[in-house]
Amino acid sequence: MGQSGIAPEVVSEVAKNQYLAITRNAGLSDDLALETYEENKESADKLTDFVLANDLKKGDIAKRLKALSPSQTPHSSVTKAAINGDAKDVAGVAGQRLKSFIERVERLEEEKAAQAEDIKEVYAEAKGVGFDTKTIRTLVKLRKMDAEKRREADEILDLYKSAIGMF
């Protein structure tokens, strides 16, 4: 038994299964994944830990796995580069800070998409009870405007209407 009270072979099997699940999700065949795992067990375990700790997306995992493909390059140096590819400072760019900004923007984009879906549902509900959604959208737009800007826009619209004979 190891320090955690779990037999080392069980820990090893769990690690291998995690690695296989990650590689399968990224599109690597099980045969190729097993081959790379057995040839490079320590690096594969580090990659698995890295992926789990950083909640990497499918595309990121696939990029890192390309480095583990036995048909492309020797494993040890490429695998280490793939594992150590975490955000870092490069040419004066603070990688971790940049990654943090990008992740924040991604979360906000997801929230924005959810809010857009909610707004769409409200318009559909209003339409369902007989309101004209185009007019509602116009009213929402007008309410956002500053009172002076709204008055100015109305005056210009009235001027243009009279200029083309709509009054």
Image: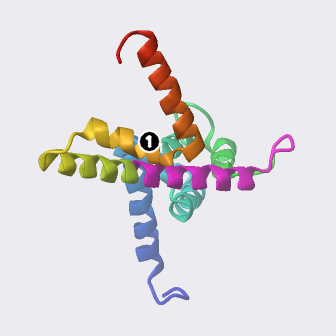
Look at the image and give the residue range highlighted in magenta: 90-113
- Using the image as rendered, state which of residue 62 and residue 149 is in the foreground: 149
Residue linked to disc 1: 141
Question: Residue at the location (51% across, 29% down)?
Answer: 155
- Relative to 35, 77 lies left or right: right
Judging from the image, the colouring scheme is rainbow
- Using the image as rendered, state which of residue 104 and residue 59 is in the foreground: 104
State which quadrant residue 6 falls in: bottom left
Please determine whether, in this image, residue 34 is positioned above or below residue 132: below
- Relative to 33, 56 lies left or right: right
Please determine whether, in this image, residue 142 is positioned above or below residue 96: above
State which quadrant residue 72 falls in: top right
Question: Residue at the location (45% across, 50% down)?
Answer: 112
- Relative to 65, 120 lies left or right: left
The answer, for residue 69, to whether it is visible in the render is no
Q: Residues within 10 Å of mark 1 (few under 14, many from 20)?
A: few
Q: Where is residue 64 in the image (x, y as percent from the top left)?
A: 56, 44
Question: Residue at the location (58% across, 53% down)?
Answer: 103
> If the image is split into quadrants, where does the C terminus sit?
top left
Q: Residue lying farthest right? A: 92
Prevailing secondary structure class for the magenta stretch in the rendered image: helix
Indicate yes or no whether the magenta region holds residue 107.
yes
The number of numbered badges drawn on the structure is: 1
Indicate yes or no whether the magenta region holds residue 148.
no
Q: Position of residue 1 (x, y in %)?
A: 48, 88
Question: Residue at the location (76% across, 51% down)?
Answer: 88
Q: Residue lying farthest front? A: 167
